[in-house]
Amino acid sequence: MSPHTRAIIIALAGPALSFLGALWLLANVLIDSGRELTFRYVIFDPGHLIIAAGIMVSVVSIPVAFQVAAAAPEDLELDLFEPEPVKQPSGAPADIPAEWETAE
């Protein structure tokens, strides 16, 4: 995936979340239009909270998207780490049978 495509996906995370909150508010207004607009409703309504979360995600994701867009493709590659092989102590034989493996 190109750096610009990654940057666009990262940058759209917050606005997409805010859009979801706006859809929630629109659906809530269409379904239950009898609510009055109070301070408690604005602060604690799930649609408003989702919009606030989208704004907070945008504050973080948009600067990250600019950094990703400016980065070289080599900087965006993930390093694959492989575990080191298990080493036997130098004085012990390589194959030591466990107690349950020995036949009596």
Image (cartoon, helix red, strand yellow):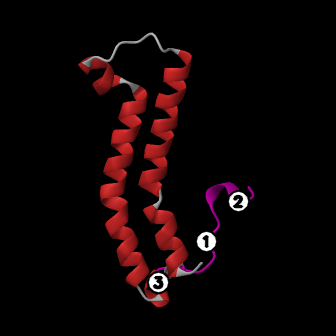
Distance from the alpha carbon under mark 3 to that under mark 2: 22 Å
Q: Name the residue under label 1.
A: 96
Callout 2: 10 Å neighbours few (<14), some, many (20+)? few
Q: Which residue is drawn at 54% across and 80% down?
A: 85
Q: Is residue 93 covered in magenta?
A: yes
Q: Residue at x 46, y 56 (%)?
A: 13
First of labels 2, 1 by sequence position: 1
Direction right: furthest residue:
103
Direction left: furthest residue:
39
Q: Which of 48 and 93 is in front in this view?
A: 48
Q: Nearer the viewer, residue 78 or 73?
A: 73
Task: Establish if 40 lies above or below 27.
Answer: above
Callout 1: 10 Å neighbours few (<14), some, many (20+)? few
Q: Residue at x 46, y 29 (%)?
A: 25
- Image coordinates of residue 20 in percent, x first then y, are 50, 41
First of labels 1, 3 by sequence position: 3
First of labels 3, 2 by sequence position: 3
Quick check: 103 left or right of 45? right
Q: Mark 3 points at which residue?
A: 91
Task: Establish if 104 lies above or below 6.
Answer: above
**Residue 101: mark:** 2
Distance from the alpha carbon under mark 1 to that under mark 3: 12 Å
Mark 1 and 3 residues: CB-CB less than 8 Å, in contact?
no
Q: Is residue 84 visible?
A: no
* Residue type at the position of mark 3: Gly
- Image coordinates of residue 88 in percent, x first then y, are 51, 79
Stretch in magenta = 84-104
Task: Establish if 4 lies above or below 49.
Answer: below
* Residue type at the position of mark 2: Glu
